[in-house]
Amino acid sequence: MTPPPGQIDSVLSSTRADFRLQAKASGESVDHADTRWVDVHRHGKMRSGRTISQQINEHSTIKFTLDLGDGHQSESVILPMTGRTGRQRLTLCLSSQVGCALGCGFCETAAMGFIRNLTVAEVLDQWHVAKFRFDSPISNIVFMGMGEPMENLDTVLQAIRILTDRSGPAIAPSRVAVSTVGRVAGIDRYRDFMTHEDFRRVRLAVSVNAPNAEIRRELMPITRSDSMPELHQAMSDWIASGGKPILIEYVLIPGVNDAVDHPAQLARWLEGIDCRINVIPYNPRRNSPWPAPTESSVDVFIDALRSEGCRVHRRKTLGRSVMAACGQLGNEHVRRKVPLRVPRA
Ligand code: SF4
């Protein structure tokens, strides 16, 4: 049974238990509510009011945008990724905001400025479109699209509760990652969430991108309010509370954070933290002051980190030409209204 359009957002944004309670409170059949919830989240029986306004395929990468009905759009990317065992998986990169306030110097979304938070229904709708309209067997979810998830954390946590429900989307908690640029209060709250037995295996990714505070302040303004020592403490607390190893993201930018002494500095800063580093070759955004790094410079950086004892993985760059690669999401027309901040190289 497909619920009427008026109920779609309510179904999308409720856990199964909450949806049953809502039905009970309004005198509806709890069993019918239960069936509706499972029909929507498990079988994709819904008519979303949001239309897909863009669909680009490139080397199996799909970037799509959904009209939100207020002149704005969410943006999402379906990425084929090869796991450590060599198995191919489809990862869905979800947006949590329209635009972003945090102004990271390498990021395309930053140029939009912050427009608004997405609702739970708008986050879940991205998953529904990926799973049912694009018929993609999504196995992994990363909150790594537009926006800083920790700035809209209530919404992100509710989305995770729904996405991991075994009678609904049934994404394994160990395959859900929230990526932050280092909002310490948000990491602490996410850690509390993780200590609940149902969510013990959710993942934390931290976009570090700099070997020291000086470079990080230039590249990522959040470093001025949430310092590197505070970030280090939040990451240590995550591990001490039983959190899984942290994924450290490091966007490698030529002439900014790839100097010969930077791998050793980064390794020293990460000492004592159970983590794996993902080195992501910089994807030049529009009017970028920096080029992409050469293959050999990426190899040299990774080898140097490994010789410091770090576990390192090289992220393959997917979707570069459709502006679907890391740090490249953001509506082009809105983006032009906000001047890009160019940190000193
Ligand atoms: S990298 Fe993330 S937090 Fe930084 S500006 Fe871009 S979207 Fe915002």
Image (cartoon, rainbow, N blue to C red):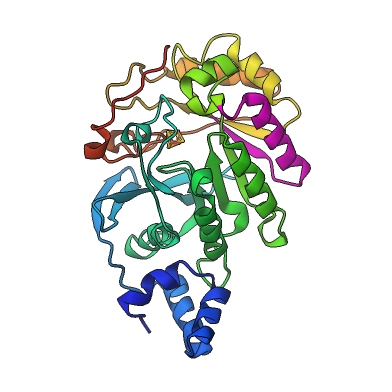
Q: Is residue 235 magenta?
A: yes
Horizontal and vertical percent position of residue 309: 71, 22
Residue at 64%, 33% (x, y): give it: 276
In the depicted structure, whether residue 19 falls above or below residue 185? below
Quadrant occupied by the N terminus: bottom left
In the depicted structure, whether residue 147 falls above or below residue 159? above
Image quarter for ligand 1 equals top left
> Can the viewer see residue 38 in this picture?
yes
Q: Is residue 252 left or right of residue 174?
A: left
Q: Is residue 205 magenta?
A: no
User: How many numbered marks does the figure carry?
Assistant: 0
| Residue nearest the viewer, comparing 111 with 54 | 111
> Can the viewer see residue 95 in this picture?
no
Q: Is residue 241 left or right of residue 131?
A: right
| Residue nearest the viewer, comparing 327 with 101 | 101
Q: Is residue 265 left or right of residue 291?
A: right
Horizontal and vertical percent position of residue 171: 55, 61
Q: Is residue 57 left or right of residue 268?
A: left
Horizontal and vertical percent position of residue 14: 50, 70
In the depicted structure, whether residue 167 falls above or below residue 179? below
| Residue nearest the viewer, comparing 276 with 6 | 6
Q: Residue furthest top?
A: 260
Residue at 41%, 33% (x, y): give it: 317
| Residue nearest the viewer, comparing 236 with 251 | 236
Task: Read off the magenta span.
Answer: 225-249
Horizontal and vertical percent position of residue 338: 28, 30
In the depicted structure, whether residue 248 falls above or below residue 42? above
Quadrant occupied by the C terminus: top left
